[in-house]
Amino acid sequence: MILSELDHPIIQAPLAGGPSTPELTAAVGGAGGLGFLAAGYQTAPAMRAEIRQLRQLSSAPFGVNLLVPGPAAVADHRLTTYLERLQVEAHRYRVEVGNADFDDDEWGPKLTVLHRERVPVISFTFGCPPSEVIDSLHDTGAEVWVTVTDLAEAHAAAGAGADVLILQGIEAGGHRASFVDRDRVEGLGILVLLRLVAAEIDLPLVAAGGLADGPAIAAVLAAGARAAQLGTAFMRAPEAGTDPAHREALAEEEPTALTRAFTGRLARGIVNRFMLQHSDAAPIAYPQVNKATAPIRAAARERGDADGFNLWAGQAHMLAKELPAAEIVRGLSEDARAALEKISTRRAER
Ligand SMILES: Cc1cc2nc3c(=O)[nH]c(=O)nc-3n(C[C@H](O)[C@H](O)[C@H](O)COP(=O)(O)O)c2cc1C
């Protein structure tokens, strides 16, 4: 179990769409945490190239994260209307709306690469693979971790044979990991989710969502997590591939909100113009909307226009520090230990 071998109970979340790099994963692993590569939106050969590049940079254990494809969606009038609405944005940034076809993010080819590359940890998000897939990855020596957002998903993942559950609270930056993207879901905070799952399921738990400093990590460790998985806290590190305008926004005291405007799947980001103008109209249609907005978002990034692309961020983004990733890992771990010691000293003094 890799969690028992880490020097620090800190995991760098997979950060698809730019921020994840082999350099970031290597720096976190080198410092005694666990880094993840994000295979989402990549081709299978690009994923394999990143795994090989990482192995050149570091011999530390690492993980690769895959996004589980949903069922192929049927055509929906809300999607058609939304694609028409996006024409205004396409015009603004002088691009065409992207091709909104469904695809499975190269699920089969990526699994084939992972079987061959013998990766230490494979995590899944947006669903739980069938137990045959989990068994076959176990046969390669991999640990299989599954991301969940409520108790029912936790039971399903445990039943399918997951080794570790990553619990994602509503505070988290980026996409909600829910197996099915729905409206009117409760959206549990990380402490509630952790305690509900710990009370019923006897698997190692990793906590994620809005954790960006040592005391917050101490809180989830005290509540039963074996480690904390942080995304936003690593996005200002120089090793991360975060876009410059996104980096600047992370440092500001701006609110975050959940939206489907950019991708057709619920995700948390810093509130900006695009989000305010389109969230109410955005349908549940992932990955179609993600592909449709891709040229618009790329053009906005190119212009340095933080109002035109997704500024994914967790609720505690103001606490993210601009420091090398290894320093972030060591600093968080020291501060978490100090916070736990402070509590036990206070109790001993009574
Ligand atoms: C830019 C960005 C990209 C993300 N990409 C992925 C991903 O590819 N796979 C995944 O499982 N989670 C992804 N997440 C979610 C993280 O795994 C994690 O749940 C989240 O970062 C935790 O909240 P925090 O950002 O407040 O630390 C992403 C988060 C962000 C901010």
Image (cartoon, rainbow, N blue to C red):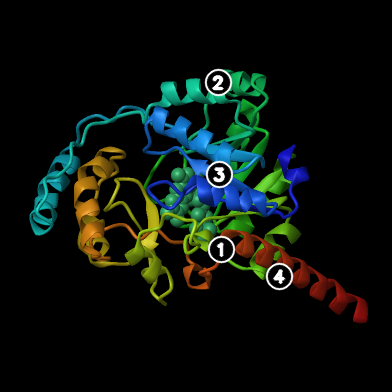
- Nearer to us: label 3 or label 1: 1
First in sequence: mark 3 or mark 4? 3
Q: Which residue is mark 2?
A: 116
Measured from the top left, where is residue 203 in percent x and y?
Answer: 72, 39
The label on residue 36 is 3
Q: How many callouts does the rendering have? A: 4
CA–CA distance in space, label 2 to label 4: 39 Å
Pick whichever, 131 or 340, lies toward us: 340
Measured from the top left, where is residue 271 in percent x and y?
Answer: 32, 67
Q: Amino acid at mark 3?
A: Phe
Assign a secondary structure to mark 3.
strand
Assign a secondary structure to mark 4.
helix
CA–CA distance in space, label 3 to label 1: 16 Å
CA–CA distance in space, label 3 to label 4: 22 Å
Assign a secondary structure to mark 1.
loop
Q: Is residue 276 something one can see in this rendering?
A: yes
Pick whichever, 85 or 233, lies toward us: 233
Q: Residue at x 28, y 40 (%)?
A: 285
Q: Amino acid at mark 2?
A: Arg
The crowd level at tag 3 (other Cα within 10 Å; few <14, some 14-19, many 20+) is many
The label on residue 324 is 1
Q: Is residue 144 left or right of residue 282?
A: right
Measured from the top left, where is residue 218 in percent x and y?
Answer: 71, 64
